[in-house]
Image (cartoon, helix red, strand yellow):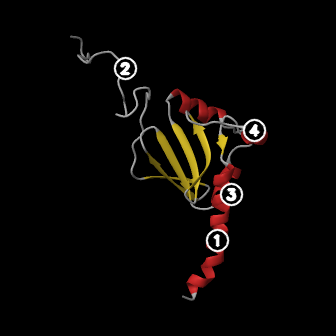
């Protein structure tokens, strides 16, 4: 057998142990990205990445730091080719989905972010949660 040869069957097999069609799996327990001074916690379930942003203000700051000609097509193409999905989450709520499981609709097209899927309920929920936290903050100082 030539050096580097394999005796494994050549058929397709799951890379992540759960999905035979996923050509790539991402496993991380502790990864933090920093963009414009904002820490983004990243975790995964194998074929889905979760990028957690602490506040709506931080999410807007990161979005504004992107180049003006940036769009979702490049990241989406990479995620589709590897059968991965990324969820951008703020305060635990999914606001954007990009990749294999994204289903962009009218709002995504209107905002010019398709093929990313915008989840308006997640964005509103994150905003309300942030306002609620801000309103409760003074009470915690004096408790």
Q: Position of residue 42 (x, y in %)?
A: 48, 50
C-alpha gap between disc 1 and disc 4 = 29 Å
* Left or right relative to 31: residue 131: right
Residue at the spot 65% in from the left edge and 40% down from the top edge: 117
Counting labels gives 4
How crowded is the residue under tag 4: few (<14 C-alpha within 10 Å), some, or many (20+)? few
Front in this rendered view, residue 128 or 70: 128
* Depth check, front residue: 103 or 88: 103
The residue at which mark 1 appears reads as 132
Mark 1: few, some, or many residues within 10 Å (few <14, many ≥20)?
Answer: few
The image quarter in which residue 80 lies: top right
Mark seen at residue 106? 4
Tell me how far mark 2 sits from mark 1, CA to CA.
Answer: 49 Å
Q: Earlier in the sequence, mark 2 or mark 1?
A: 2
Residue 122 in view of the camera: yes
Q: Residue furthest right?
A: 110
> Residue 20 appears at what percent x and percent y?
39, 27
Quadrant assignment for the N terminus:
top left
Secondary structure, mark 1, is: helix
């Amino acid at each position: 057998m030539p050096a580097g040869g394999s005796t494994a069957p050549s058929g397709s097999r799951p890379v992540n142990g759960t999905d035979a069609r996923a050509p790539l799996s991402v496993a991380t327990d502790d990864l933090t990205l920093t963009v414009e001074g904002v820490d983004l916690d990243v975790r995964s379930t194998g074929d889905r990445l979760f990028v957690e942003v602490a506040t709506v203000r931080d999410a807007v700051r990161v979005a504004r730091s992107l180049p003006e000609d940036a769009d979702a097509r490049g990241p989406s193409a990479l995620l589709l080719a590897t059968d991965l999905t990324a969820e951008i989450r703020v305060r635990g709520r999914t606001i954007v989905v990009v990749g294999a499981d994204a289903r962009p609709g009218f709002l995504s097209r209107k905002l010019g972010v398709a093929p990313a899927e915008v989840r308006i309920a997640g964005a509103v929920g994150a905003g309300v949660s942030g306002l609620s936290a801000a309103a409760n903050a003074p009470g915690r100082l004096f408790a």
